[in-house]
Image (spheres, rainbow, N blue to C red):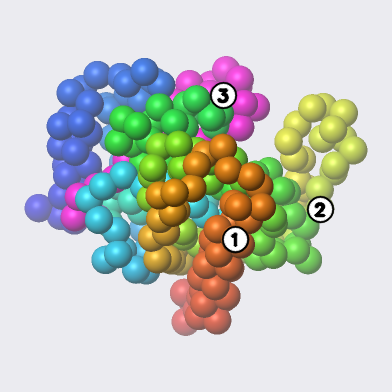
């Protein structure tokens, strides 16, 4: 059996065991998720040549996965989702938390929810974690992808909301970093005034319409548990040391990745 078939059959079995071929309350359709995987995996494996570093640290349990956000459009989320579905002995079906803007779009909204994406509000996040689902969060928010070229890989300030949700659900946080996605669109200018007028979260302008085949590396950091005595209603200053620690870990992974970063030229040689 070839590796591709073996991989998607393993994912199909995982989905069937967990969801019994039924949609969950947020719209995940197991059959559609497998179809999406079959489309995404060749791009993941061959076009972006993704390498998944540190996966031995990932256990067969639920996580709140926290990542930097790169690449102007959320291709990074699809690559992370594919990595967790394809590369682990026990596939993890990540539930990306997305902006309301995406869920409101006629086609993309339904497509993303059927693949596992969920509107990123506090209630959804808590309910997912309490059901043992693993979620994917980009704490930089839209600022993470709304960067011009000069600011590539500059980590934006994390918001504290995900820490309060992790405390409420007593979930373990898994910091990760994506390196290589900023090169999909290397020359970017953001039309911020037009975006505000159109009520869009971002409106990037790039020299290339399609993403370049930049090789991508995903780095897994050390799982992070918040103190048991800390409450979800804790003061901001009580959360600050943990926010800084997670920002530093993600930034450490980014810098490690940049030191070893592969390029399109490397793939051609």
Above-or-below relation of 121 to 229: above
How far across and how far down the image is residue 123, in percent? 50, 25
Residue 229 lies left or right of residue 45; in this view the side is right
Which stretch appears magenta? Answer: 88-113
Q: Quadrant of residue 17?
A: top left
> Is residue 104 part of the magenta span, yes or no?
yes
> Is residue 62 part of the magenta span, yes or no?
no
Q: Residues within 10 Å of mark 1 (few under 14, many from 20)?
A: few
Residue located 81% across and 48% down the image: 190
What whole-number distance in Å separates the C-alpha atoms at marks 1 and 2? 34 Å
What whole-number distance in Å separates the C-alpha atoms at marks 3 and 2? 25 Å
| Residue named by callout 3 | 103
Above-or-below relation of 21 to 87: above
How far across and how far down the image is residue 207, in percent? 75, 55
Q: Residues within 10 Å of mark 2 (few under 14, many from 20)?
A: some
Element at badge 3?
Answer: helix
| Residue named by callout 1 | 241
| Earlier sequence position, callout 3 versus callout 2 | 3
């Amino acid at each position: 059996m070839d590796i591709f078939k073996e991989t998607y059959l393993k994912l199909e079995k995982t989905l069937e065991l967990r969801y019994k071929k039924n949609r969950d309350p947020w719209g995940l359709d197991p059959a559609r998720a497998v179809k999406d995987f079959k489309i995404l995996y060749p791009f993941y494996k061959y076009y972006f040549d993704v390498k998944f570093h540190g996966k031995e640290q990932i256990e067969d349990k639920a996580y709140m996965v926290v990542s930097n956000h790169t690449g102007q459009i959320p291709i990074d989320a699809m690559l992370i989702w594919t990595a967790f579905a394809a590369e682990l002995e026990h596939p993890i079906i990540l539930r990306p938390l997305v902006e309301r803007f995406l869920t409101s779009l006629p086609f993309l909204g339904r497509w993303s929810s059927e693949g596992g994406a969920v509107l990123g509000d506090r209630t959804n996040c808590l309910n997912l974690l309490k059901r043992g689902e693993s979620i994917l969060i980009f704490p930089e928010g839209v600022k993470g992808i709304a960067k011009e070229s000069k600011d590539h890989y500059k980590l934006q300030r994390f918001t504290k909301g995900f820490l309060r949700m992790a405390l409420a659900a007593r979930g373990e946080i898994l910091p990760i970093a994506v390196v290589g996605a900023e090169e999909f669109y290397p020359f970017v200018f953001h039309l911020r005034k037009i975006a505000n007028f159109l009520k869009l979260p971002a409106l990037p302008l790039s020299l290339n319409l399609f993403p370049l085949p930049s090789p991508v590396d995903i780095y897994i950091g050390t799982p992070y548990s918040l103190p048991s005595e800390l409450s979800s209603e804790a003061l901001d200053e009580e959360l600050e040391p943990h926010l800084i620690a997670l920002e530093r870990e993600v930034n450490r992974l980014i810098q490690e990745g940049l030191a070893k970063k592969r390029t399109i030229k490397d793939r051609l040689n």
